[in-house]
Amino acid sequence: MKILVLGSGAREHAIVEALLAEHAGHEITAAPGNAGIAAQVETVSLDPSNGRIVADYATDNGIELVVIGPEAPLVAGVADVVRAAGIPVFGPGKSAAAIEGSKAFAKRIMDTAGVPTGRAIRATTLDELVAALDDLGAPHVVKADGLAAGKGVLVTEDRDAAISHAEYYLQYGTVLVEEFLTGQEVSLFFLSDGRDVVPLSPAQDYKRAYDGDQGPNTGGMGAYSPLPWLSARWGSEAAFVDEVLDTIALPTVRTLEAEGTPFIGLLYCGLIVADEGQPGDSAVRVIEFNARFGDPETQVVLPRLTTPLSELLLAAATGGLGRLPYPTFSDESAVVVVLASEGYPENPATGREITGLDEAASVPGVTIAHASTAVSEGRYLATGGRVLGVVARGDGFASARTAAYDALAKIGLEGGHFRHDIAERVVR
């Protein structure tokens, strides 16, 4: 199959890796890709957020499936333009992608679908914002309504900091003040063809920049999968997944279908599992929805997938998920640790050389998912904040963690930093 993958991050690198791992002879092109992706498949320099350009390229080159990785092209409506050209697309149209592009839209859909979530108050002025903060109390959760590259959310006890954060985003539109929910966070992906839904395996990511969940929120500094602690509470991971499917994913997809905005693609459910309560009594609530594969969770979920990814993506894009069995996964443990540039997330340094990648990739069980990299005169350079993810698989989390950190020790990046505690809790 001729497949075009749109995007340039580690998520897209993980998608390309999973498609290549099928050994099915796919012709894969990435646009625009990055240095790591370019070392494996053809890349083309085109704007992934320009639907007309993407549709013309796909038509001219006989593309049979377009996979949209990042949120920006989805919110821009690229899927609509490509779909109108008669090409199967894995990714929701603009109206359905608003479930990520607008936090207020997502909350309305949750309310209509009866999905368990926290209270939220919409604010368009500073006075409304202050009143909402006082109503819901601390810790304060303030979210930009639109896309903010993973930096639009602030959770803080500091009322002045919450107001300052909101003031910045009020310049651009609405903000939401939400109820603070306590418990473990879980990321769970669902493939949807607009009506039917099938789940992938849960993962947990780490949003804070530094060890011990300290520092500012980031786009994600690491992740692991599966989540063995879910079995201790639900009896099995499958029981947890089924509950989320029945109470959250399926009602959401069916509500979008009923509103005439079918969701075709990947529904990312960002969940909180309450510290107290039992399965079935709203112990699981939604923090957020995204309209695409999560990063860095994709880097630990897809390497464990044993069902061919291309089969799932094409079925979702063409309305055939209801005819497929649930995807299957290996029993391996997977860990990804993100290497970030100095100054990330506030002001990342770029243009610095990355060394030791071949040595790191030679560690058994390790692959490197490039995120913000380029090649210049034979040298790999960091071009953004999150530079790459070191992905390790092993027979248990102890061996996967050891491999990941052994590989990281071989990589050089001046001022680079990473968390040392990814999946540490699950090993203990």
Image (tube, helix red, strand yellow):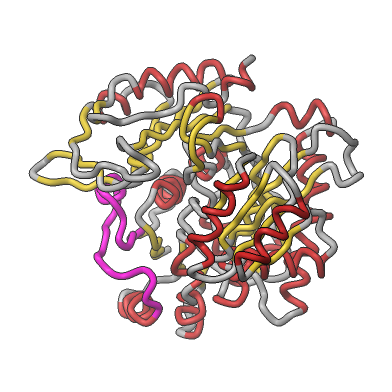
Residue 374 position, x and y percent, is 22, 47
Q: Can you give x and y, in whole percent of width and height, for residue 128 in the image? A: 68, 66
Magenta region includes residue 354: no
Determine the residue located farthest toward the left in the rendered image: 377
Q: Position of residue 93 (x, y in %)?
A: 56, 75
* Residue 191 figure quarter: bottom right
Where is 395 relative to 309, above or below?
above
Which corner quadrant of the image does residue 196 belong to?
A: bottom right
Q: Is residue 315 visible?
A: no
Q: Quadrant of the C terminus?
A: top right
Name above or below for residue 78 compared with residue 129: below
Q: Residue at x 82, y 40 (%)?
A: 239
> x, y (%) of residue 330?
60, 33
Query: Residue drawn at (23%, 44%), measured in percent from left and top?
Result: 350
Nearest the eye: 80 or 102: 102
Region in magenta? 28-51
Along the horizontal axis of the image, is 74 left or right of 244?
left
Which quadrant of the structure image shows residue 95? bottom right
